[in-house]
Amino acid sequence: MNHQMETPCGSSLAMYGALTKMGKSVDVVIPEYPRIFEFLPNADKIKEEGKENFEYDLGIALDCTDTMRLKGFEPWFENAKTTISIDHHGTNTMFADFNYVDPASPACSQTLIVILTMMGVEIDKEIGTCLLSGIITDTGGFRYEGVTTETFEFVARLLRIGVNVSSVCKKVLQVKSRANFELTKLIMDRMEFFENERIAFTYITKEDEEKVNTEPRRP
């Protein structure tokens, strides 16, 4: 399984938990991801790459619009006997053998809740915590357009099984590293305003990221 880095790894770890609960042997492969998600259940199981010279029976891509988003997992995914893509982006290129794409869903994890329920998988506290993380990040903490009544119904369901919504929100949205603060300072210091202060412009560079050591977590 693989998940693009831009949207953190909640849905991948939720799928990992579901498949292992079903008795499957699973590798969850995420070449790099933000360190703030190390708190998620089974984050210590994440691998940087798949097994060498190994053909998987099934490759699952989560929250990826195309193979470019697989971030180094492409060889293992493309060589798998069967491939599945689960996503919520209308721009998905339907690159897998089987594609479950729901553009009406504001989060891949919300789509995944529907799929796991259809599969008869019991969503426990660990799986629920991962799903909630994915919902929070994909919706910007429920701030983006596209959030539905169903989104909050799912969150209520996760609350009922013991998922600590407040704690996950704080860890996902409010925990900042020193490198993050230093980059924010650079962004603010470089900000310029145009068109009677209606447009703001700023930037950071790759060199800035290297200088403040914003390297993502590698398994």
Image (tube, helix red, strand yellow):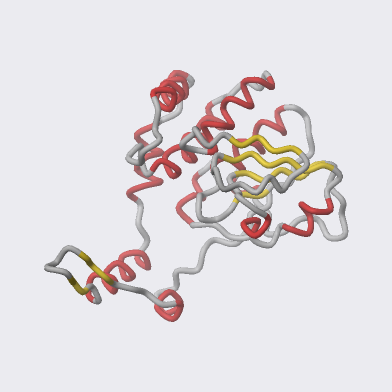
The residue at the far left in this view is 196
Residue shown at 62%/57% (left/top)? 69
Q: Is residue 106 above or below residue 151?
A: below
Q: Nearer the viewer, residue 213 or 200?
A: 200
Residue 59 location, x and y as percent? 76, 45
Q: Is residue 203 above or below residue 108?
A: below
Residue shown at 79%/39% (left/top)? 25
Residue shown at 44%/18% (left/top)? 160
153 sits to left or right of 67 = left
Residue 82 location, x and y as percent? 82, 42
Question: Residue 102: which quarter of the image?
Answer: top right
125 sits to left or right of 141 = right
194 sits to left or right of 95 = left
Residue 61 location, x and y as percent? 67, 46
- What is the quadrant of the C terminus in the image? bottom right
25 sits to left or right of 92 = right
